[in-house]
Amino acid sequence: MALRLVLLGLLVALWTWLQVQGAIGPQPQGEYLVAGAPAWEPAPVRGCSPEALAALDVRVEIPPPEGGWPGVPQAVDVFNVFAGEVMVAHGEREVCGRMHDAGTRDSRFRAGVGMVVVPPAGDMEPIRVAWTRPLKPAWIPTVRVGAPSPVQQIDTARLLVRAAALAVAIALAFTALMGFLSARDGVFLGYALLCLLAVLWQAILSGLSGYPQPWLPVGESEWRWLTAFSCIGLSTLLYGMWLLVGGAALWLSSRRHLLQLTLACWIGGAVLAATLPMAALAPLARGVDLAFRLGYLMVFAIGLYGASHRRAFAAAGGSAEGTAGLAAMLPFLAMGLLDLAGNRWLVEYRVEAIQGSITWFLTVSAYALNLRLGRLRRQRDEMQQLADTDALTSLPNRRAGLRTLEQRLQQARAGDGALTVGFLDIDLFKRINDLHGHAVGDRVLVAVARVLAAAVGEPAHVIRMGGEEFLLLLPGVEGEAARRRMEFLRRRVSEAAAGLGVPGLAVTASIGLASLRAGDRDAAALLRRADEAMYRAKRGGRDRVEAAVEEPEPPAV
């Protein structure tokens, strides 16, 4: 009920928002539609304030080719500057922009801060670029220069990769929420939280927190936000990696301890990033990176141990997700090796590499969650099977049998078909227990159940109601045909004792049968008539079949 109310509320909110945005209205007439409105302001390209220029401590000059600029448009795009203003200038033209506010940048560049200039042919003045020095030396800004079309295409491709990584994380979060509603397992909620955290972390890392308008209050505190989310994101990644490779199976109390440590990193990272002076943020950011690398190596070693000692690992409680955990960690290992080698590609596409690694980790984790969901469903089915099955005879028990009877009754009414039930009771079963022992009595029950199931053909139509009583369902059968079937079952029960090899053992059964009547409102009336017929068979000498006395139905009013 609560879920329905939430969904209804979301639909109402969506409808209201669409109306406010003007997306819902009368359908336009004609062969085309004109949307939008004329512009009243120039493009959001702004110059650099003296304060912004004073903070730019890294300045780069891009010299013209030999013989001077050729007199054609030149595009300049600056990537991987995560905080502060970026200046691009040539001659007297000078513009600034911030990664976390797309409204301050040239609209032709969305993954970086760029500008298109047209130096006169033969001009020897360089293009000037400046930015604020990053906190971490490994985060090297990249400047791409070239013809506007290919430079802008690369910029657009990087934007698409960054946006796609966020979209995948959002989709996986919704999938995990659906999994939680299906399995009621808190692990799915934890994974959904991880995906939402990845969305925020990647948005800040890639600058999408300011696209198309700032939707996170990053402002001019980019490095504080990045440092805080590095602490939060990297510690959460390590915790997820530990669980994926099966580390919690080797160290049973580690789940609780590492969760506490992860929460401490969340709180401590956020507080330190918000309160430390800027000069202290660089050591904190480098320390977080170092701690992640050390933790990563430890978790990866545990995963390798689990993969190479599968039997011992399984005995400790590890599962098939351990291999998936190693696969999820491989992109981070590749990034570390490329970092050690000083790879140029990684320097230029570091943001995309990090987002790709996070997306891969989330995707493989979703695969591991699907394995877990499959196990939970199998366990649920097994528990349901155990709850519905008689432990001794493996027949459906009373609860499952009555549910099946109700289904067959509804089908008979819907199709105007026949339905007959038989109540079978083993004669003098207490005497069998007294003379031959309860072990023989159990063998008799198992033998009777086996011959009944074989004779009926459909296991769900033979139910052990309790003790020595069985319920038999004959859909589509009534009248004399039903009686012949019950007589056949009675003889098969009498023959069951012969195969047990117990001297002096005789097994007979009394059966009462009743067919569905138009006036039967539920299964209780049908069962009552069959039960009464069975007791008439008992009183008539046992080892016989008696049909219910079909009283005339009351006339319709």
Image (cartoon, grey):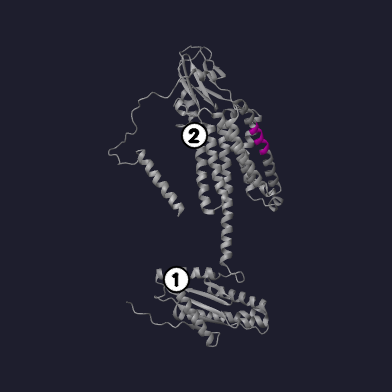
Check disc 1 and report its element: helix, strand or loop. Answer: helix
- How crowded pointer 1 is (Cα within 10 Å; few <14, some 14-19, many 20+) is rated as many
Q: In the rendering, at what x and y percent does residue 106 appear? A: 45, 25
Q: In the rendered view, would you say 481 is above or below 219?
A: below
Q: In the rendering, at what x and y percent does residue 443 appear? A: 64, 76
Give the residue type at disc 1: Leu
- Tag of residue 376: none
* Residue at image mark 1: 409
* Residue at image mark 2: 216
Q: Is residue 96 left or right of residue 236?
A: left
Q: In the rendering, at what x and y percent does residue 175 appear? A: 51, 47
Q: Is residue 230 visible?
A: no
What's the residue at 66%, 30% (across, down)? 340
> Which image quadrant for residue 549?
bottom left
Give the residue type at disc 2: Leu
SS majority, magenta: helix
The stretch in magenta equals 287-295
Task: Point out the residue furthest to the left here.
Answer: 29
Q: Is residue 434 magenta?
A: no
- How crowded pointer 2 is (Cα within 10 Å; few <14, some 14-19, many 20+) is rated as some
> Which image quadrant for residue 258?
top right
